[in-house]
């Protein structure tokens, strides 16, 4: 399967990375693994969804944020390896959701990112382990931050 064509077919665009917000790199490679830094739902350097899911941000917008952050994580992978067709396996998706008190649907927020990985990479490559953690605050007031661990060819 050509993952780059799959992305285009879904009418998605993998952006050029925004400069890091601190002293880090977007991703590192060790052996065949690529580990991304935490990615926010940024577009053109602008935060798309600010606030806590279950309060200022709806579940649906939290899911949109998770997809946007995932696209940015894939941009970090592509930045490092040059081509997403080098992805052999999505190993792990780690997700943090800025959550209102009493909001317990962090897995539903991150399902949007997990489902998108399956749409892009298919079941064999795209199925992955995952964490879904609720937190009080995230950088820039973001509602979602996630990172990936990816095995490459």
Image (cartoon, rainbow, N blue to C red):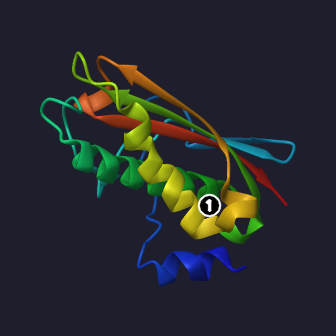
Give the number of marks.
1
Q: Is residue 126 above or below residue 120?
A: above
x then y, percent, for residue 144 = 35, 36
Report crowding for label 1: few under 14, some 14 to 19, many 20 or more residues within 10 A (C-alpha): many
Residue at 22% x, 44% y is: 49
For label 1, the residue is: 78
Residue at 45% x, 62% y is: 16
x then y, percent, for residue 78 = 62, 61
Quadrant for the C terminus, please. bottom right
Q: Is residue 100 above or below residue 153?
A: above
Q: Nearer the viewer, residue 3 or 77?
A: 3
12 displayed left or right of 26: left
x then y, percent, for residue 35 = 67, 40
Picture quadrant of residue 84:
bottom right
65 displayed left or right of 75: left
43 displayed left or right of 55: right
Secondary element under disc 1, as helix, strand or loop, is helix
Can residue 21 be seen here? The reply is no
Residue at 17% x, 38% y is: 57
Residue at 42% x, 52% y is: 112
Picture quadrant of residue 1:
bottom right
Can residue 151 be seen here? The reply is yes
x then y, percent, for residue 54 = 20, 31
């Amino acid at each position: 399967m050509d993952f780059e064509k799959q992305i285009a077919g879904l009418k998605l665009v993998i952006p050029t990375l925004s400069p890091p917000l601190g002293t880090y790199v977007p991703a590192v490679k060790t052996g065949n693994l690529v580990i991304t830094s935490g990615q926010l739902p940024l577009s053109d350097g602008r935060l798309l969804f600010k606030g806590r899911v279950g309060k200022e941000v709806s579940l649906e917008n939290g899911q949109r944020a998770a997809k946007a952050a995932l696209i940015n994580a894939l941009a970090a992978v592509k930045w490092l390896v040059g081509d997403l067709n080098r992805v052999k396996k999505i190993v792990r998706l780690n997700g943090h959701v800025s959550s209102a008190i009493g909001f317990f649907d962090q897995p539903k927020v991150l399902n949007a990112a997990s489902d998108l990985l399956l749409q892009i990479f298919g079941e064999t490559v795209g199925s992955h382990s995952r964490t879904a953690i609720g937190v009080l605050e995230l950088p820039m007031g973001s509602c979602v931050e996630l990172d990936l661990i990816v095995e490459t060819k």
